[in-house]
Image (cartoon, rainbow, N blue to C red):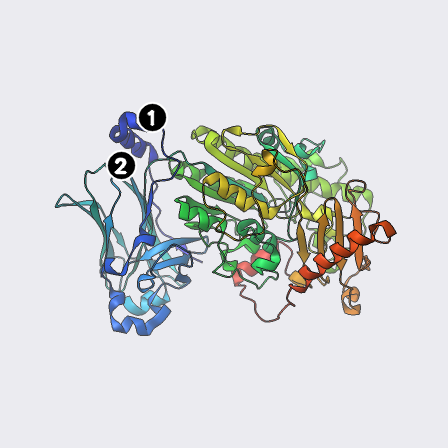
Amino acid sequence: MTRVIKIRPIHLAVIAAAALAVFGASCRKPRPATPVVYRFIDQLKPLGLILSPLQAPAMAVLGENAFPIKSRPMPESGSGDPALGVKRKINLGLAEIDILFAPPKSEYRYAFPLRDAGFLDFGIGIIRDANSAAQTGPAAGASDGVNFRIVLKAGGRKKVIFEERLSLPLTQESRTLNFSRHKVLLPPRSEEATITFVTAGSPGAFSFWQNPVFYAPNSGAPNIVLISIDTLRPDHLGAYHCAKPVSPAIDALAAEGVVFENAYSTSSWTLPAHMSMLTGLNCGRHRVYYEDDRLDPGIPTLAEKLRERGYATWAVTGAGFVSSLYGFSKGFDGYGMNQVALTDARLAEYGGNEAVAWLKENSDKPFFLFLHTYQVHSPYKSPDPFPERFLGRDSRLKKVDIQTEMGGLSGIFKPMRPEEREDIVGLYDAGICYTDDALIKPVVDALRGLGVYDRTLIVVTSDHGEEFFEHHGWNHTHGVYDELLRIPLILKMPGSKFKGRRVEPIVRITDIMPTILEIAGAPVGETAINGRSLSPLLEGRERADRVFLAEFSDNAVNAQIPQRVATNEGRRKIILNQPFTKQEIAFFQTRPPVPPPIELYDLRADPGERTNIAGRPEEAPLLRALVQHAQEAAALVPKKVEGRSKIDKTLEDQLRALGYIR
């Protein structure tokens, strides 16, 4: 675990006052929709590497040992030449960030073409680990350090616009870090300039610049906040006709936005569903089916496309199955994984606080914030007084881990008394209510308070639902019925466009990415994805149900459940079920429901999927077409390969807390 020694706060009030002094009345003029951004990581060319210890032949022999542990070359498209490997992502335990690795003495020089006034935003840091100790030696102490300097040359004159010294972090058994964040105001210039980033000091020190970026204050481009509340069913929200007072903040947001009444995910568990959300691809395209799969670095992500557009991209997540280890951090300037203790009852509050803090520091630039929480996920727990609001007077439960309550994963088909089920549902609803109060409301209030609410697209959704014994099971890693696949999808558009609209046709989780890209003005056509923008539905140019494809791969997350595949033609939904083996059936304490090979449901007449109409003669032509479509999808699913796990100890503990590992 990385221990942070020093963090220096940024005083934005001072910066804002300085900005107003420089910009004056020009701040009130309309800004162009295209963000004015210069990413120094992307723009570093080999000619700009004026000086670096990494240029020495001996450093090439060291390979990755010449760089910090848990760092890797950047996979983002648009990051340009690798420049000796100095463009990196580094995992600091609670976050993964983009850095320019710059051990002393390093000089990185840029021909800086922008003449607008704006901010130079960056961090400086030194990390101490086993690789750095091999270069600095054990004798290096806190008195040693690194000077960080930025030099601006314009009109033949040089000026040091930033200078700071950091001491080496103290030696510990784990990695240690000394780090601080900074913003420097650059006035307008009449000529092009050069900017040089210089580090000097203790030889071998692992110093770095964290994602240096120049930007003009928000150019009018729409901001984007994508909120994924893990395991959230739509029918437990007021916006989707739930009678309980569970979600006032989400409901208020829905009243100012668009509610998609029939949105479907691509899977009934976190990892593949979120991968579809953030790539716009069905599972058969992104190929992340199992808990030891990782996204192909060549597949573009939503964050990556917005980063290319000039957006500041940041994530606040609960890690686990959305850990950066699976490739989710691709395209993010920083990928937060700060909700480490997933057994804590206040996950939503921690996520909300972190998101609000980030917004306060970054609301003056075009931003994309991805916000994820496991608060609603089992184990169902929330702080007082939320459980009491939704439990019966004589309830024996104040929190519950479904799998523990049922005797482990093998007990997920165990029946319970009606009053016990009501208490479990009540605790689930308490988690929703707490998330609404501790995460949604503070984030919306912060956007309003910062004056960016009206030009921000806010998306509230989930990755999958949860079963409360509707089909004789609990939790979610076992099927593809609607209580597991249907997700909420609420869009509060910039300027509250389409306010109050409700969209009935079926849409997909894969449609989120192209919709966001279109609203941000990013090119969508260049990205070959399964999803399509939702704009035609909003504008009345499309009225038909879209075709979804959902899969649960054979024995994913060791659930002992065979493959399930679902798709649709309009409101007819087909499910293909592979048979249980004798060993799989024997695994469970209570015999699992054994579905027929083919199920067909009319979702309009039978939204609870109670009556299988696959045997009706009049359905035969449609059934043949749907079976062929589903079989083609099922054929793409690879068998699980044992022994590929990349799960580290931290991730293992998180998955255990969520009930995936026992």
Question: Residue 359, located in which quarter of the rendered image?
Answer: top left
Residue density around tag 1, few if under 14, some if 14–19, many if 20 or more, within 10 Å:
few
Residue type highlighted by circle 1:
Arg
Q: Which residue is mark 2?
A: 117
Residue 56 spot, x, y in % from top left: 24, 70
Which residue is label 1 attached to? 28
* Quadrant in which the C terminus appears: bottom right
The residue under label 2 is which amino acid type?
Answer: Ala
Quarter assignment of residue 292: bottom right
User: Residue at position x 75%, y 49% from top?
Assistant: 573
Numbered label attached to residue 240: none
Pick whichever, 171 or 655, lies toward us.
655
User: Could you tell me which secondary element the residue under label 2 belongs to?
Assistant: loop
Task: Look at the image and tell me whether residue 616 can be seen.
Answer: no
Q: Quadrant of residue 555?
A: bottom right
SS type, badge 1: helix
Residue at the left extreme of this rendering: 156
Q: Is residue 467 above or below residue 631?
A: above
Question: What x and y, as percent, mark residue 112?
Answer: 24, 47
User: Which mark is first along the chain, 2 or 1?
Assistant: 1
Q: Is the residue marked by circle 2 packed among few (<14), some (14-19), or many (20+) residues within 10 Å?
A: some
Q: Which residue is painted at 57% across and 49% down in the image?
A: 277
Q: Nearer the viewer, residue 221 or 130?
A: 221
The total of numbered circles placed on residues is 2
Q: Is residue 364 above or below residue 616?
A: above
Location of residue 576 in the rendering, given as x and y in whole percent from the top left corner: 75, 58
Q: Is residue 233 above or below residue 29?
A: below
What residue appears at the point 25 percent right and 67 percent down from the top-left corner? 55
Residue 418 visible (yes or no): yes
Residue at the spot x=12%, y=45% of the render?
A: 156
Residue 498, x across and y down, in percent: 57, 29
